[in-house]
């Protein structure tokens, strides 16, 4: 009898229990900004854009002669201290005479373009575009360029020094699209790391886009990149020949992008490319 009463009490208490309230996790950029403010407060530059506050991690040159300024655009969903080469370069390049600025990448909006009025009214189902829709890619591109332009306005650039942009992954893809449109911007060199666009249509046109980029271009790929990217890299070599882009160089690093040995080779390739300009 006692056992039965205990079971009844336990069951009734569970029936009165309410489900836990769902709490939206904090945005990646907010968590990232908290960490950067905690550990690198003296190296941060705060940029204001229409989308809100963006942080850039600054490291001054540490050689006898200043060679220039390097702006780094990490891959999508990566921070300024990305382990895929940029975290290493942000410090290593200061020893080579460059000020480095690593910009926060925008928050990803997976719902961009998902609920358009036309599709809702007509009940249309669009074909698969890839991991990202064009609307999501366009929004990411817009926010990234806004951060870059906000940082550029703060820079004191010298015509005798080099102004270099290093971009990775999706950031490299959308920034290349921007440069291919021949904007009013003077960049001495663009270095791309595993450049790609997570949209089938846009990625298909990326080889042609890279061949139209104005500044000299060093295109870095890794042997352990995905097969789609490696196939795309082969097409880039064909397009640069067609469009006579003689200042294009492609290098394949053997290994993964987060291996320390590859970081050192990446630095060597980058330095050799910039010294020949």
Image (cartoon, rainbow, N blue to C red):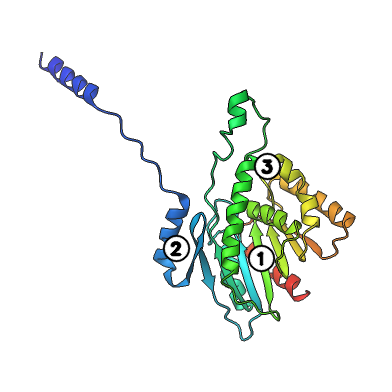
How far across and down, in percent of the image, does residue 83 sit?
A: 56, 59
How far across and down, in percent of the image, does residue 174 sit?
A: 67, 53
Q: CA distance from mark 1 to mark 2?
A: 22 Å
Which residue sits at x=61%, y=29%? 119
**In this view, 64 is above or below 142:** below
Q: CA distance from mark 1 to mark 3?
A: 23 Å
Quadrant the C terminus occupies: bottom right
Considering the numbered disc 2 on the image, is that residue within a helix, a strand or a loop? helix
Q: Nearer the viewer, mark 2 or mark 3?
A: 3
Return the mark for residue 146. none
Return the mark for residue 165. 1
Q: CA distance from mark 2 to mark 3?
A: 31 Å
**In this view, 235 is above or below 160:** above
Considering the numbered disc 3 on the image, is that residue within a helix, a strand or a loop? loop
Left or right relative to 241: residue 91: left
Residue 148, image quadrant: bottom right
* Residue matched to label 2: 36
Callout 3: few (<14), some (14-19), or many (20+) C-alpha neighbours within 10 Å?
some
Quadrant the N terminus occupies: top left
Is residue 253 in sight in this rendering? Answer: no
Which residue sits at x=21%, y=20%? 11
Which residue sits at x=41%, y=48%? 26
Left or right relative to 178: residue 31: left
* Residue matched to label 3: 199
């Amino acid at each position: 009898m006692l056992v039965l009463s205990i079971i009844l009490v336990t069951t009734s208490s569970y029936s009165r229990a309410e489900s836990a309230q769902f709490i939206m996790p904090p945005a990646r950029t907010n968590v990232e900004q908290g960490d950067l403010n905690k550990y690198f407060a003296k190296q941060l530059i705060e940029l204001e854009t229409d989308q809100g506050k963006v942080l850039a991690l600054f490291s001054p040159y540490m050689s006898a002669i200043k060679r220039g300024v390097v702006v780094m655009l990490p891959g999508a969903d990566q921070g300024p201290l990305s382990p895929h080469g940029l975290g290493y370069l942000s410090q290593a390049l200061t020893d080579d005479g460059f000020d480095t600025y690593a910009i926060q990448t925008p928050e990803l909006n997976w719902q961009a373009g998902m609920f358009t009025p036309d599709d809702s009214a007509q009940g249309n189902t669009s074909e698969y575009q890839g991991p990202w829709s064009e609307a999501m890619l366009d929004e990411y591109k817009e926010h990234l360029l806004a951060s870059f332009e906000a940082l550029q306005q703060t820079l004191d650039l010298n015509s005798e020094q080099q102004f270099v942009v290093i971009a990775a992954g999706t950031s490299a893809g959308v920034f290349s699209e921007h440069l291919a449109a021949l904007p009013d911007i003077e960049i001495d060199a663009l270095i791309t790391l595993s450049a790609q666009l997570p949209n089938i249509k846009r990625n298909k046109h990326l080889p042609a886009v890279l061949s139209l980029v104005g500044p000299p271009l060093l295109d870095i790929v890794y042997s352990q990149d995905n097969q789609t990217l490696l196939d795309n890299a082969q097409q880039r070599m064909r397009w640069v020949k067609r469009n006579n882009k003689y200042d294009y160089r492609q290098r394949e690093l053997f290994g993964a992008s987060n291996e320390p040995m590859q970081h050192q080779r990446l630095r060597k390739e980058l330095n050799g490319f910039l010294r020949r300009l």
